[in-house]
Amino acid sequence: MSGFERGTLRWAKVAVFMSALAAIFVCLQWWEMHEGGGDTHKLAEAADKQATKMETMSGAADKIRDSAQTMAAQDQRIADNAQKSLDASIAAYRLDQRAWMQANVVWPPAIGNSGHTPAFNVNYWYSWVLNDSEVNDVAKWWKTRKEPKTINQIAVMFPTQTNGFFNDTLENSYPNNHPEVTGHQKVVYLIGEITYWTFHKKHTTRFCGLWVPEGKGFNLGRGCNTWNHAD
């Protein structure tokens, strides 16, 4: 075998060897890519599972938050209802136990406390009015009058306590002793107002009565109903 042939053979062996190395390298690359692809798939699956878990946890957190808000709203409603019930109970108690100032429009007339607790800072005025005839609307009529008023003040009036007031202008403090009244030439009105405090709240009572000579007493209607008031 000549030297040229031997050289050619050597280069052929090198070429085969290099081809084998290239083939091995390609196989290794393919294997690595294959294995890497599997790992990437596993990582993707794991990431998807993790994302699903996070979404589930987020949904659970939203539900907990919504439940907390619902419970807070329910607690607030319970608190509001409890406060309303308490306020209603207090109001009912005060209404039942409060002072009630009123005028006893009988003879002799007087103001009195018919409630269960004292009335404080009681101020009242009254006026006896002689008029030519009955009035249909005392409240409207009284605004046009300039009658003298008797004004009194009492610091405290206890339950069942009364304080009388009398006719300062009519003869002998009794309307029927006045000839014009018994003769029906004149009519007599007793008009007044009381203000007082109970349970830290101011109240007003207005009273009016028309004297009826035959009945020897006062009629609270016949025009007085537009003036009479109590709160």
Image (cartoon, rainbow, N blue to C red):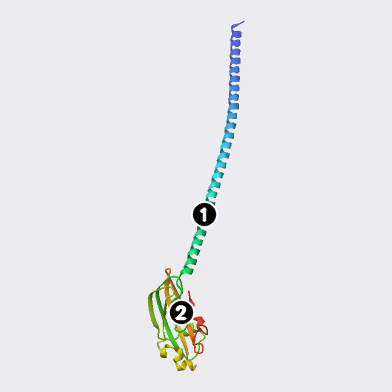
Can you say whether 70 is above or below 38 in the image?
below
Q: Which residue lies furthest to the front in this view?
A: 160
Q: What residue type is labelled 2?
A: Ala
Where residue 187 appears, as percent x and y from the top left, is 48, 90
Where residue 195 appears, as percent x and y from the top left, is 42, 76
Crowd around label 2: few <14 · some 14–19 · many ≥20 (10 Å):
many
Q: Residue furthest top?
A: 1
Q: Which residue is drawn at 48% across and 64% down?
A: 90
**Which numbered tag is attached to residue 186?**
none
Residue at mark 1 to residue at mark 2: CA–CA distance: 48 Å
Can you say whether 136 is above or below 196 in the image?
below
Residue assigned mark 2: 103
Mark 1 or 2: the one toward you: 2
| Most foreground residue, 33 or 82 | 82
Q: Quadrant of residue 202?
A: bottom left
Q: In which quarter of the image is residue 126?
A: bottom left
Can you say whether 51 is above or below 189 in the image?
above
Residue assigned mark 1: 75
Query: Is residue 185 visible to the viewer in this orientation of the structure?
Result: no
Q: What residue type is labelled 1?
A: Asp
Q: Residue at x 38, y 80 (%)?
A: 152
Where residue 182 appears, as percent x and y from the top left, is 48, 92
Q: Residue at x 44, y 92 (%)?
A: 178
Query: Is residue 89 visible to the viewer in this orientation of the structure?
Result: yes
Relative side of 131 to 23, left or right? left
Where residue 193 appears, as percent x and y from the top left, is 44, 79
Crowd around label 1: few <14 · some 14–19 · many ≥20 (10 Å):
few
* Secondary structure under the numbered disc 2 in the rendered image: strand
